[in-house]
Amino acid sequence: MIGTPFILFFASLAFFHCSEFLLALIFTRDELSMNSWLISKPYVTAMAFAVLEYVFESWATPALKVGSGGMGYVSWLGLILIVLGEGIRKLGIFTAKSNFTHNMRTTRQPTHVLVMRGIYRYIRHPGYLGWYIWCLGTQVLLGNPLCFFGFAAVAWRFFSTRIKIEEYYLRQFFGSAYLAYAARTPTWIPMIP
């Protein structure tokens, strides 16, 4: 019942959360807290549903879910999405350094600059896009159709709201420079300009 995708799912969760905490420690030590692990009750609930869907579908339709315990094309696609999402997000963190934070800033810090180089030249919110791809990749890896669509909808709604709020503050901090940057640089998250 427990196949390679299930093991890789937990490995991807462990890597994501440990690396996020480590990067927060490196770049934003003064803001480091338990929240830097990026684990919340809604997140744990969502991941629990993912595990339940995987286990139930593995039991109900084992040939479709795990087969011989190896990985099929769908699982490989999921793993590729996980790596791609991690890469985009981590590149965004390494590029922005202390300007990247897990907490939305509502006041401009003296060292806060508008980052428009590197990956930010092509993606306005690489941290959000990377996580969006990563979270969907976890569900493709597991072959979870219900959670895939559920995660897509919930994550999209979260980012749609969060980006609007964050960009309000970024316009306050950086004025016309941010407006020009936002006009030429897409988020690449579907239906979030």
Image (tube, helix red, strand yellow):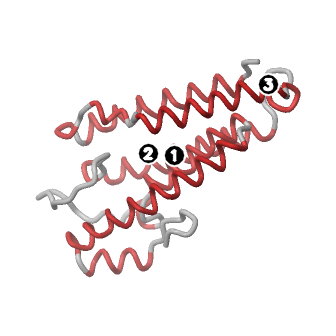
Measured as percent of width and height from the top left, residue 150 is found at 61, 48
| The image quarter in which residue 10 lies | top right
The image quadrant where one finds the N terminus is top right
From the image, tell me which residue sits under label 2: 90
Give the class, few, some or many, for how many residues have Cα within 10 Å of label 2's Cα (few <14, many ≥20): many
Three-letter code for the amino acid on which mark 2 is drawn? Lys
Q: Earlier in the sequence, mark 3 or mark 2?
A: 3
Q: Secondary structure at mark 3?
A: loop
Three-letter code for the amino acid on which mark 3 is drawn? Gly
| As drawn, 7 above or below 175 | above
Asked if the residue at tag 2 contacts the one at tag 3, i.e. Cβ–Cβ closer than 8 Å, the answer is no
Q: Secondary structure at mark 1?
A: helix
Q: Earlier in the sequence, mark 1 or mark 3?
A: 3
Measured as percent of width and height from the top left, residue 39 is found at 40, 33
From the image, tell me which residue sits under label 3: 70
Q: CA distance from mark 1 to mark 2?
A: 5 Å
